[in-house]
Image (cartoon, rainbow, N blue to C red):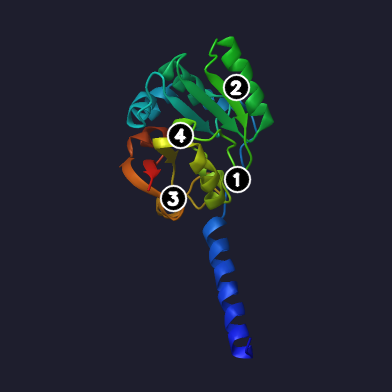
Amino acid sequence: MKPTRYLLAIALLTLSLHAQTSQTQRPTSTPYAGDLSIFEEPGREDKLQINRVMDILHIAPGKAVADIGAGGGWFTVRAAHRVGEGGKVYGEDINPAAIKAIEQRTAKEHLPQVRAVLGTTDDPKLPAKSVDAVLMLKVYHEIADPLDFLANLKPALAPGARIGIIDRNGNGTDHGLKQSILEKELREAGFREVEHYDFTKADGQDYFLVFEVR
């Protein structure tokens, strides 16, 4: 290879690696690992209009749902009641204490349709083509490598699955992420935005976005 071609190849490779890094890494918040009871705030169900959220995500009896970043299972149990014993809910989290809490809670509440799943920071570890709907409630801003995470989530989606993301605007480190950045990342990962709402502002969340595989 001639020197000029060699230098050009090195320059293109450097630009490519820089582009990949800028796309997949950004400031993020440290994943919450504290008292899980803080998510059980009285009135939260009404503030978030969680039944409306489930309607928009087409969560119905017999469906399969993934609660990504489930914490103590606040949404997990509500989705379980919605899908019934003929459905399935995956309560996913990267915190082993959260997984234990979900298992104990759903056993106590007799919800055999719930399966607790210990994921990793870049992979939710869900079975292939297993879910019809996904909700990421106040957790997307904690995902440091979104393109890797979304690439690993995509195989778990059944045809026509909907992905809902509820979050607030922020700089990534303050438990929020600018909506335009989130939308850009989802586009790059091969998703298209199909609906967006702001009725979650009553709970301090700026947006509720819905995506499908493009």
- Sequence-first tag of 3 and 4: 4
Q: Name the residue under label 4.
A: 134
From the viewer's side, name the closer residue of 43 and 64: 64
From the viewer's side, name the closer residue of 45 and 103: 103
What is the distance, in whole Å, between disc 1 and disc 3 at their CAs? 15 Å
Q: Is label 2 or label 3 in front? A: 3
Looking at the rendered structure, the secondary structure element under dot 4 is strand
Residue 167 visible somewhere in the drawing: yes
On-image quarter of the N terminus: bottom right
Instruction: Using a 10 Å C-alpha cutoff, classify the residue at mark 4 as few (fewer than 14 neighbours), some (14 to 19) or many (20 or more).
Output: many
Q: Mark 3 points at which residue?
A: 186
User: Is 89 placed above or below 193 here?
Assistant: above
Question: Where in the figure is residue 174, as x and y percent of width and height?
Answer: 54, 47
Q: Name the residue under label 2.
A: 102
What is the distance, in whole Å, between disc 4 and disc 2 at their CAs? 17 Å
| 37 displayed left or right of 88 | right
- Please name the amino acid that badge 2 sits on: Ile
Residue at x 63% of width, y 36% of height: 94
Q: Mark 1 points at which residue?
A: 122
Looking at the rendered structure, the secondary structure element under dot 1 is loop
| 171 displayed left or right of 45 | right
- Please name the amino acid that badge 1 sits on: Asp
Q: Find residue 71 and report its image quarter.
A: top right
Q: Find residue 168 and report its image quarter.
A: top left
- Please name the amino acid that badge 3 sits on: Leu
Instruction: Using a 10 Å C-alpha cutoff, classify the residue at mark 2 as few (fewer than 14 neighbours), some (14 to 19) or many (20 or more).
Output: many
